[in-house]
Amino acid sequence: MTVYEAQARVAEIRSRIGLGAPAAAGGGDAFAAALQSTMDSSRAVTGASVVDAAKQYLGTPYVFGGTNPESGLDCSGLVQRVYADLGVKLPRVAKDQAREGTAVADLAHARPGDLLAFGSPVDHVGLYLGGNRMIAAPHAGDVVKIQEVYETPTAIRRIVPTTSLDATSMGSAAASTGAMVTSAAMRPASLTGVPYADLFQQAGAKYGLAPSLLAAVAKVESGYNPAAVSGAGAQGLMQLMPATARGLGVDALDPAQAVDGAARMLSSNLDRFGSIDLALAAYNAGGGAVSRYGGIPPFAQTQAYVPKVKAAMEQLAGRGFA
């Protein structure tokens, strides 16, 4: 929900309960409850959920003026559809979408889910995934796909609320007060109680993944144990096989490297297979097995693994770690 929509919703609620006129008993409480409900629905959408929603449209053909994924989408049709799936209304055309939300200074400060606008006047939009990549419907003859951010955006807009503090503003605050910024003092509440939460948050932003996905994989794979070694030889927090870790160029027993490597692998799986279920299946059984069977392989371990990780994701999201 944008600021403008929130304001309109507040006006609607005020009108409905007659705020400003002699109010019935409990009128103020009714308004407060309605306003809180509106704000809660806005906060429920995160950058990570925007990214997940966008990836389901990978491969959809570009159609100029298209707003229906069954027949095709154009760039602004994709953006509008993704946010609509999450209950957030955006204008139809790119130049109007590029005025929604709040401004982001530059690409260095962009986060997954931010809207990237191009052209002056704006004639193209995409959704930032992190790692200098975006998902967009490029042009006629192409499909919705993930691509590099090929030029400097003319506008970057944050449509959904920020869920973590910007490192630059944290540093500025510390400098202005002369105080040392501590991770405990500045950490968002959503990180509380999740081991290695900072690593999952950083890797999620870098590769356009939900931090809860990475945390859930770590929970199921190792119980958050960075020294775990399985009977098959998988190692560390993310249970990477030695050959896999070598291919990724990481030390499986180093938590920061393991999370980064696992995030890269999951991001690649998502790009390749287009769904979280298949990305997780590929993480567990290998991409070759997923391709060979055309879906989740009929292996008991993998069949159990996918729902187990998704259940862990839901538990983490229920605790505020999304």
Image (cartoon, rainbow, N blue to C red):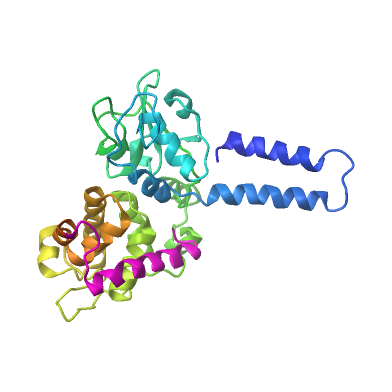
Q: How many marks?
A: 0
What span is in magenta? 293-322
Screen quadrant of the C terminus: bottom left
Image quadrant of residue 258?
bottom left
Q: Residue at x 49, y 49 (%)?
A: 45
Q: Residue at x 24, y 30 (%)?
A: 142
Screen quadrant of the N terminus: top right
Residue 59 visible in the shown view: yes
312 relative to 154, above or below? below
Q: Nearer the viewer, residue 135 or 161?
A: 135
Q: Quick one: which residue is furthest to the right in this view?
A: 22
96 relative to 209, above or below? above
63 relative to 161, above or below? above
Q: Is 298 inside the magenta-drawn segment?
A: yes
- Judged left or right of residue 306, residue 37 is right
**Would you say the magenta stretch is mainly helix, strand or loop?**
helix
Q: Is 69 inside the magenta-drawn segment?
A: no
- x%, y% of residue 165? 45, 51
- Judged left or right of residue 3, residue 65 is left
- x%, y% of residue 244? 13, 64
Q: Nearer the viewer, residue 37 or 163?
A: 37
- Judged left or right of residue 300, residue 7 is right
Image quadrant of residue 216?
bottom left
- x%, y% of residue 82? 42, 41
Q: Nearer the viewer, residue 305 or 212?
A: 305
Q: Residue at x 50, y 46 (%)?
A: 161
Residue 157 visible in the shown view: no
